Image (cartoon, grey):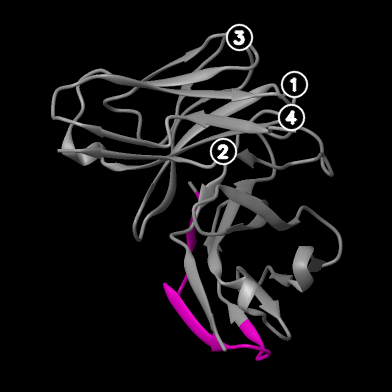
Amino acid sequence: NAGVTQTPKFQVLKTGQSMTLQCAQDMNHNSMYWYRQDPGMGLRLIYYSASEGTTDKGEVPNGYNVSRLNKREFSLRLESAAPSQTSVYFCASSETGPWFARRGENEKLFFGSGTQLSVL
Amino acid sequence: AQSVTQLDSQVPVFEEAPVELRCNYSSSVSVYLFWYVQYPNQGLQLLLKYLSGSTLVKGINGFEAEFNKSQTSFHLRKPSVHISDTAEYFCAVSGAAGRRALTFGSGTRLQVQP
C-alpha cells in the first residue's frame, strides 16, 4: 500500500539548472497537488490538478510548470532553478477536487514524504 | 480570501502534561477546518477535521479540537501528551462552498520532554 510516492527524496541543483520532481499515487484519486514548505510559512500550494487533463495555478506558481501525465502521475518542473526555490516539496492527492461540493464528503489530503531541494 | 494564524511556533511541554495548540482563522464564508500532523521526515497526516455538526471534534491519537465560530478559533488539545506526540502540527482551512483549496498555517512544533 504505497499511497503517494515522490522522487527524488533529496536534490542539489546549481542556479539555472532544470529538474523534474515526480509524483505518483495508487489510490485512484482524482486530484493531485504540489506544495512547498518553508520555515515559518507552512505549506503553500504551487499547482494542482483537479482531474486528469486539467491543471491550475495555486498560491505560488511562478518558476514552476506541471504535467498531469495520467490519473496516477503529476510532475513538477523547475525550468531554471533559483536559490529562492530551495524548499521541501510535497505532493498530495485527494479523492475529491480542491472544491468539495457536498457536506460530509471525505475531505482528506494524502501526502508523500517530501523532496528536499537545495539550489546553490 | 482566507487565512490561518497559528500563534505559537514552538510549544515545549513535559510528558503526561496537557497541551493546547492555538489556531485562529479568518474567512468571509463558512469554513471547514483541519489539523494535520507531520512527524520528522514524513509527509502530513490528517489528525481531525470539522465540517459541520458538533463543535467538539475528536481525532486520532487522543487529540480533540473545538470549533468556536464567535472567536474564529479551532484550538487543538490533548489531556496528556506522550514523547511520540513530538511533531509539527498544522492548522488548515477551506471554504465550505465553491472553489476552495486548503490554506495552511505556519505550523506549531510540539516538543514533548521526559
Residue at screen point 86% across, 66% down: B54
Q: Quadrant of residue B73?
A: bottom right
Query: From the viewer's perspective, is B105 left or right of B62?
Result: left
Q: In which quarter of the image is residue B99?
A: top right
Give the residues in magenta: B2-19
Q: Which mark is residue B5?
A: none
Q: Which amino acid does label 4 sit on?
A: Glu
Above or below residue B67? Residue A55 is above
| Chain containing the residue with disc 1 | A
Q: Using the numbered discs, state the Cα–Cα distance from disc 1 to disc 3 in whole angstroms.
A: 11 Å
Q: Position of residue B75 (x, y in %)?
A: 63, 73
| Residue drawn at 53 percent across, 25 percent down | A23
Residue drawn at x 74%, y 21% as measured from the top left: A28
**Contact (Cβ within 8 Å) of mark 4 with mark 1:** no
Q: Nearer the viewer, mark 4 or mark 3?
A: 3
Q: Label 4: how many residues lie within 10 Å, few (<14), some (14-19) or many (20+)?
A: some
Residue B85 % position (x, y): 63, 72
Point out the tag, 4 or 2, that comes first from the N-terminus.
Answer: 4
Q: Do labels 2 and 1 share a chain?
A: yes
Please identify, in this view, whether the residue under mark 4 or under mark 2 is nearer the observer: 2
Q: Position of residue B61 (x, y in %)?
A: 76, 68
Give SS at disc 2.
loop
Q: Does the magenta stretch include residue B6?
A: yes
A74 over A8 or under it: above or below: above
Nearest to viewer (mark 2 / mark 3): 2
